[in-house]
Amino acid sequence: MATGAGMLLGLSAWIAYLTWPRTFNDPLPQCLPVIRVIDGRLAVQLRADALLADVSGPGFRSELAAYLHFEYLQTHAGLGRSRVLLTSKNFEDGLRYQIFLVPENNVLVDVPYLDQLELQGYIPGYKLLPVTFEGLARKRLETAVFEGSYNPGHVPQLASLPRSKLLAPLASFLVFKSRTDRRVREHIEPVPTTLSYPQAEQLAADILDVTRFYNLPLDIFLGIGAMENDYMNVRGDLDHAVWKRRPQRGDLVLKRARGRVLVSDYAMGVWQITRETLRRAHELYLKDKRDYSILPPRLRPSKQFTFDLDDSEVLTTYAGLLLRHLLDLSNGDVAKAIGAYNGSLQRPNYQYAAGVEAVALYARGFLERAANLDGLSVGQTWLAPPPRLTRGNQIAAGLRAFPYKNIQVSSE
């Protein structure tokens, strides 16, 4: 009697769910569900071997972007790593990469879970798709090929990689970080503007030029940019102000008292350099003996100091000079130099330094792995042959290209 009442309640809930007047981004599969009681819990399952949730929206055209988001969801989706899948498929307009989650196949659990992921900005939306065991195994195999390709046993060290191998993966990393920023994901006002790919390419080139010029560790510099503003150009600490003995040219004086002045000290640009720190960085630049003609013109500071640099690439140069200066004064203590960037040499912010080093570790690993592929498209080369190949050519291409003969595919 209780089971029958539970099933009747479940069927009523299912009908209400389908007929309730609200808008879905993507409809549920058009098939009748099966209502069961599993371990004392009501379950509404679709008639399929398994269920997938396509969470890639229109799909990714960039393999690097797709792989970054794939790894991101492995960490943030709250599922086991084997329940996040990455595949590639040829469409009429070209190759696209898709990310799937493998939920429980219980609509009463899966839909609220996916709605929450969408609300938190981790996914753009979702579409539930029934799949056979064979289809699921194929997607797991494709995922294993991607993971095997991006996680080889040995990769070259970041410091040894040439600029040509770093530029594209670095630009993809910058775009990814800006788009997964919490303010962007959760639409926290004012929502910062994320990087376009052309903007990211330019910033990536500037970062590579500056780190090479000042002999800086690229991963640490990237960690600072991520911790400061995820590489987006937004003013920060708008209410921050400092007391000075006397105002200097360009200062925004907020208050005068007892022979001193309170001046605005907000932070600007990708690297969140405050106005007073910018003034000190310019003083360092004027004393610096390096040959700045080596840098591209857009990265060379003017001899004349100005605060009007919010949209200027020169801020990347100033940030590099500051970090170089702090590293030199810290006698090789990298954590102290990083902490001083967000504090001072007397009171370094070691919590900030730990965050920078965490991002640096991931950035270094991704760049080394991506650069190791040297522009090779795993999806295009091994997984998604052109749609008009004959059957014989498909087999031949597969025998030539597929790199893993004894690959293990999880069935979780």
Image: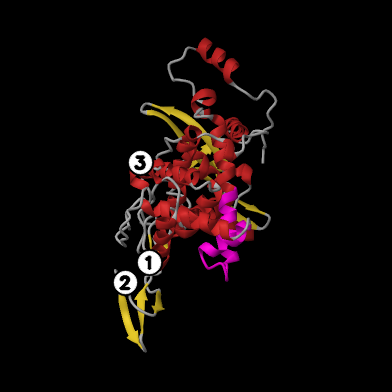
Tag 1–tag 3 contact (CB < 8 Å): no
Does 351 appear in magenta? yes
Please tell me which of labels 1 and 2 falls first in the chain: 2
Specify few, some or many for label 2: CA neighbours under 10 Å numbering under 14, 14-19, or 20 or more: some
Q: Label 1, secondary structure: give it.
A: helix
Looking at the figure, which quarter contains the C terminus? top right
Q: Can you say whether 371 is above or below 252 in the image?
A: above
Does 308 appear in magenta? no
The residue at 64%/33% (across/down) is 152
Tag 1–tag 2 contact (CB < 8 Å): yes
Foreground label between 2 and 3? 2
Disc 2 marks which amino acid? Asp
Any mark on residue 198, and which? Answer: 3
Name, please, the residue furthest toward the top: 392
Any mark on residue 275, and which? Answer: 1
Any mark on residue 251, and which? Answer: 2
Q: Can you say whether 268 is above or below 239 in the image?
A: above
User: Which of 248/136 is in front?
Assistant: 248
Disc 1 marks which amino acid? Arg
Q: Can you say whether 182 is above or below 144 in the image?
A: below
- Measured as percent of width and height from the top left, residue 45 is found at 56, 47
Q: Is residue 35 visible?
A: no
Specify few, some or many for label 3: CA neighbours under 10 Å numbering under 14, 14-19, or 20 or more: few
- Measured as percent of width and height from the top left, residue 325 is found at 51, 57
Looking at the figure, which quarter contains the N terminus? bottom right
Q: Label 2, secondary structure: give it.
A: loop
Q: How was this image coloured?
A: secondary structure
Start-end of magenta stretch: 333-361
* Mark 1 to mark 3 CA distance (whole Å): 28 Å
Please tell me which of labels 1 and 3 falls first in the chain: 3
The residue at 32%/57% (across/down) is 309
- Measured as percent of width and height from the top left, residue 402 is found at 60, 22
